[in-house]
């Protein structure tokens, strides 16, 4: 496969699959999605316990979708789907289907980074309710902040993946088992909103 075959995306890593697609929504729709999400969502800044002390997370977030989820040992009820998020979700599903990855999502974590100081620390999205080999898709709107990856077994150097406005990054099965990722602080950067779509195994009520 050519390194950049637009319908199939740009292969950044073959195994596990890390694939980037650009121009997901198109310029006018992407600009209005960024603006609507920024203004219409009830952005939260929960406090999390870390090494025995509580800190507000260094960004804002909204959990959205159909499935209850557990985070830091607590159960949360997600916010109902916002129409802009439904439109983005459906564009993601369509783009991935064209690329040969039929998939579905029942939840999304939206992250809002107001400035380059806001960030997300090293982690893998490997909670049990995501299943053994989840497929997770991140959509980026606004400032281009690279996602940094590092191998858990240090088999190769860490690397950055650029996440331009209106792009989609597919983290295929096996990514969370082999790699961690982080959104590190940047000296100067404007507003960025990311949406990471997942399938959470529904828990019995
Ligand atoms: O904002 C980003 O690009 C990273 C988000 C992320 O890793 C997550 O939501 O789990
Ligand atoms: Fe993540």
Image: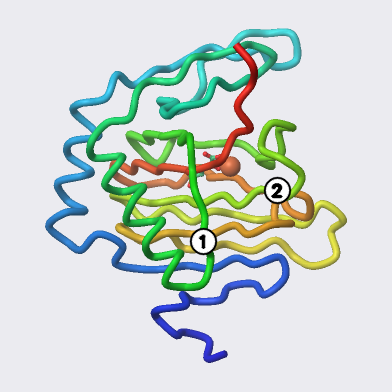
Q: Is residue 174 visible?
A: yes
Q: Residue 39: percent from the left, percent from the top?
A: 18, 28
Q: Residue 99: percent from the left, percent from the top?
A: 47, 73
Please identify the quarter of the rendering in which residue 126 is found: top right
| Mark 1: secondary structure | loop
Q: Residue 125: percent from the left, percent from the top?
A: 65, 40
Task: Tell me if residue 84 comes above or below residue 54 in the rendering.
Answer: below
Q: Quadrant of the N terminus?
A: bottom right
The residue carrying mark 1 is 102
Give the class, few, some or many, for how many residues have Cα within 10 Å of label 2's Cα (few <14, many ≥20): some
The residue carrying mark 2 is 180
Q: Is 205 placed left or right of 176 in the picture?
A: left
- Circle nearer the viewer, 1 or 2: 1
Say whether disc 1 or disc 2 marks the residue closer to the N-terminus.
1
Q: Residue 86: percent from the left, percent from the top?
A: 30, 41
* The residue carrying mark 2 has its beta carbon less than 8 Å from ligand 2: no
Residue placed furthest toward the bottom: 2
Q: Nearer the viewer, residue 112 or 16?
A: 16
| Mark 2: secondary structure | strand
Give the class, few, some or many, for how many residues have Cα within 10 Å of label 1's Cα (few <14, many ≥20): few
Task: Tell me if residue 63 comes above or below residue 197 in the rendering.
Answer: above
Q: Residue at x 72, y 55 (%)?
A: 150
């Amino acid at each position: 496969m050519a390194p950049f075959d637009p319908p199939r995306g740009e292969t950044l890593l073959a195994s596990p699959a890390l694939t980037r697609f650009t121009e997901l929504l198109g310029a006018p729709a992407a600009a209005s999605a960024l603006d609507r999400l920024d203004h219409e969502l009830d952005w939260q800044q929960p406090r999390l316990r870390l090494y025995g002390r509580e800190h507000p997370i260094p960004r804002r977030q909204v959990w959205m979708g159909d499935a209850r989820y557990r985070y830091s040992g607590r159960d949360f009820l997600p916010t109902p789907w916002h129409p802009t998020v439904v439109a983005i979700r459906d564009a993601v599903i369509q783009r991935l289907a064209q690329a040969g990855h039929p998939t579905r999502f029942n939840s999304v974590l939206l992250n809002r980074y107001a400035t380059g100081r806001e960030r997300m620390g090293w982690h893998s999205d490997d909670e049990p309710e995501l299943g053994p080999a989840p497929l997770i898709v991140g959509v980026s709107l606004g400032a281009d902040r690279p996602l940094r990856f590092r191998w858990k077994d240090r088999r190769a150097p860490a690397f950055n993946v650029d996440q331009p406005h209106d792009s989609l990054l597919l983290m295929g099965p096996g990514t969370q088992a082999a790699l961690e990722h982080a959104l590190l602080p940047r000296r100067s950067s404007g507003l960025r909103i990311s949406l990471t779509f997942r399938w959470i195994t529904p828990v019995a009520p």
